[in-house]
Structure formats: structure tokens, C-alpha cells
Amino acid sequence: MAASASAATAPASLRHKEDDVMGILSYTAVMSLDGYIADTDGDFQWATPSPEIFDAHLQRMSEVSTEIMGRKTYELMHFWDTYPDSDEATPAEKVFGRLWQHIDKIVASSTLSPTDMVADDELVPDLDVERVQRIGQEAEGVVEIFGPTTAADAIRAGLIERFEFFIVPIIIGGGLKALPEGVRLGVVLVEQRTFENGTVYLRYERTA
């Protein structure tokens, strides 16, 4: 994955802990224009970030203290537990890897075992909405849920306070939806940005 060097100037602490980002439950998705995070074959290579977007992910991840994810995402992101030590890694990729290694990770999976976990990563075989709410209350910084299946119940329960979407200019016609069916929530747009490749970033906050 290519990334620019301009984002290599991450803060020394690697994570921000300002009062205004403590205890926020957030859901992030990179999706197609028609609302899918992967096509019917499970492919999402079309969502590979440009260097400019990779830099935006660095800024976003600098606020994250805790990541909640499912098995597939955890196995995919295991790459970042070792890659920053590679001579092939760009400065920005090294920063992302250090950010990833320093956040708390909670993995919702009934098929993984404790021996599959890296270091202090936590395995939760049955992640219910009460546990998600408790994690959000106890954690510092942004608690990000990544993956629509893992986030679905929390979205339905109205626990998600922040939604961050990277909308890629492609229509794929079907696959895994970014948002669950049957959900109606009030949100307000608080930030938007258009990247050079046509991808649009939208950040929404839930209304009362």
C-alpha cells in the first residue's frame, strides 16, 4: 500500500486524548457510491486509499484509543503488527503501524482462540450492545467499531455517536452493505472533504 511521507509528522504521543474526543463511539466505513464495503465476491481492492487519503486515515487514527472489530478485519490488520519494521515501509506507513500497535484492540469472534491474539489484544466471543456501551464509557479517546457486521447491533441500538464515511466514486451493484437494514437515526453533517481522486469524506454526528 503506497502512502505519502507528509503524514510522518504524527504527534509523539501517537494518540490525542483531548476532552472532546473521550468516550466517543464511532463507526467508520469505506464504501462504494451505492453503499457497499465489498462486492459480491468479497473484493474491496477498489477502496485502496491514495496517498492523500492514507494521510487522512493517519489523522483519524491519531484520535482512536480503542478498536472493536471482527475476525476478518483483525486478521487483515495483523499485517500492521510487523510491517512498519520493514525496509519497504514508507514513513507514513511506519506512522500508521505505530498508531495501530498502540491502540487497544477488542476482537468479536467465536472462532478465534486466545492463542490467536497478539500481545494484550482482547477476544470477546459474544459482543453484545451492553458490552459495547461499557467499552465506550471506560475507554479514553475515540472507540472505533470497524466492519458493518460487528457494528450492526450498536448502530441499531443508537449507540454510535459518530459516523465517518469515505465514499469511493464507484458503483459495484451489490455485496456487503455498510449500514444495516431497518435503521432510522437522525444525524447532522459536521465535516466533509473531497479528495483529488473523487473520494468524498463525510463525518456525521448523531442528533439527540
Image (spheres, grey):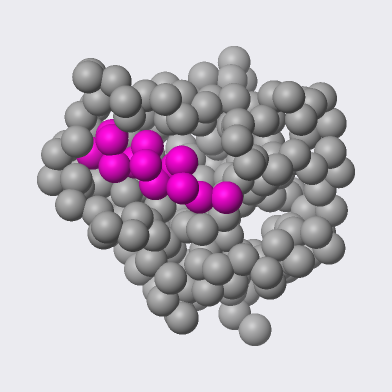
Q: Residue furthest top?
A: 41
Residue 62 seen: yes
Tell me which secondary structure the magenta stretch mostly adopts.
Answer: helix
The mark tally for this picture is 0
Which image quadrant: the N terminus?
Answer: top left
Residue at horizontal 46 percent and vertical 48 percent from the top = 102
Q: Quadrant of residue 146?
A: top right
Q: Please tell me whether residue 10 is drawn above or below residue 125 in the rendered image.
A: below
Front residue (pair 2, 198): 2
The x, y position of residue 173, in whole percent, is: 54, 28
Q: Please tell me whether residue 119 is drawn above or below residue 56 in the rendered image.
A: above
The x, y position of residue 129, in whole percent, is: 81, 59
Residue at horizontal 23 percent and vertical 39 percent from the top = 92
Residue 187 seen: no
In magenta, the rendered stretch is 92-104
Residue at horizontal 52 percent and vertical 64 percent from the top = 142
Which image quadrant: the C terminus?
Answer: bottom right
Front residue (pair 35, 204): 204
Could you tell whether 163 is left or right of 72 in the image? left
The x, y position of residue 56, in whole percent, is: 29, 50
